[in-house]
Amino acid sequence: MGTRRDPTARQLRLAVELRRLREAAGLSAREAAALLGVNSVQISQIEAGTTGVSEERLRRLAAHYACTDTGLIDALAVMASDRVRGWWEEYRGRLPTAFLNLSELEHHATFRWDVDFLHVPGLLQTEGYARALFSRRVPELPEEELGLRVRHRMQRGVIIEGPRPAPYRAVVHEAALRIKVGGREAMRGQLARILELSEAEHVTVRVIPFELEEFADVTAAMVYAGGAVPRLDTVLRDGPDGVALVDTEARLAVFRTLFHRVEAVSLDPLRSRDFIHGLAKEL
């Protein structure tokens, strides 16, 4: 297989998991290469994501590493043989790589959880809301890139509105629902959109009102995407240096716990719908 200049987040995740399996087995890259009958450079390239690995070689490596988690091995084999070029590829070279990585992650997600405090989660946004949000960027985006970002965000909705929707749970703070992004009329349409989407059986939206005192110690905005097995889950978090991917088992366990705590202190789905209806009437 040839080398890659810019491996995707999914390709890098496969590489990281193979390195973790090798390290758990207590083997060096040189020892793993000898077991596979290749040189250590090839193992290094595989573990860097700059070259692919066949399913046959992956399963041989897993056997050498004494990995008995068949669910994980099968999931990694699917990742190794994946040649999907999804709808997001039309944006490659036109939008930042983080946008494409998010789309790829969502495409393969078995479920999706969102927690947000200041903005409506991207999968629930209307076109008007998204455009107003991207328009706030400093420096200002050129119209062409602004249009691309809005179109990309709308296409991402396929994860919950497409032919094979993934289970989706969102927890949104009242602050995000009161900030009038795009103005009063745009926000009215945004609230109506949330109510419309929340009618689907696979979509659950919960609200955290300002009045909830139990909320103070569980603040953790996140995008949580479920993998084929829990070990392959991923959390995305926005930081001062850009989007960070969290994929270690210990950290994933922390974010799973935080999500359940946030859900536990939020309003149930029915009361949340009533709450959003009330906000819409105020507009």
Image (spheres, helix red, strand yellow):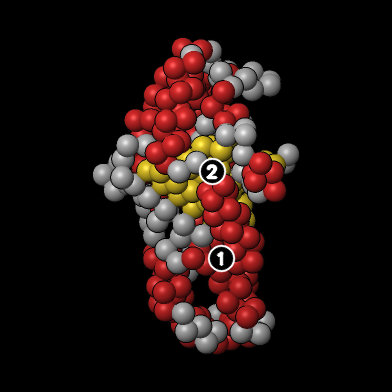
Which residue is found at the position 64% from the left and 44% from the top?
Answer: 215
Give the x, y percent position of residue 40: 63, 77
| Image location of residue 66, percent across then percent down | 52, 87
Residue 278 vs residue 216: left or right? left
Q: Which of 216 and 200 is in front in this view?
A: 216
The answer to whether 101 appears left or right of 107 in the picture is: right
Q: In this view, does 136 lie to the left or right of 177?
A: right
Q: Nearer the viewer, residue 28 or 283?
A: 283
SS of the residue under disc 2: loop
Q: Position of residue 204 (x, y in %)?
A: 41, 43
Say which quarter of the image contains residue 82. bottom left
Residue 51, visible in the rendered structure: no
The residue lying at 63 percent from left, 60 percent from top is 254
Report, in whole angstroms, how far the alpha carbon at label 1 lies from the one at label 2. 38 Å
- Residue indicated by mark 1: 15
Classed neighbour count for the residue bearing mark 2: other residues with Cα under 10 Å, few (<14), some (14–19), many (≥20):
many
Please give the count of numbered marks on the rendered protein. 2
Q: Identity of the amino acid at label 1?
A: Ala
Q: In this view, does 35 lie to the left or right of 56?
A: right
Disc on res. 266:
2
Q: Residue at x 36, y 49 (%)?
A: 166
Q: Nearer the viewer, residue 3 or 205?
A: 205
- Residue 126 picture location, percent across and down: 43, 25
x 62%, y 20%: residue = 136
* Residue 218 visible at all: yes
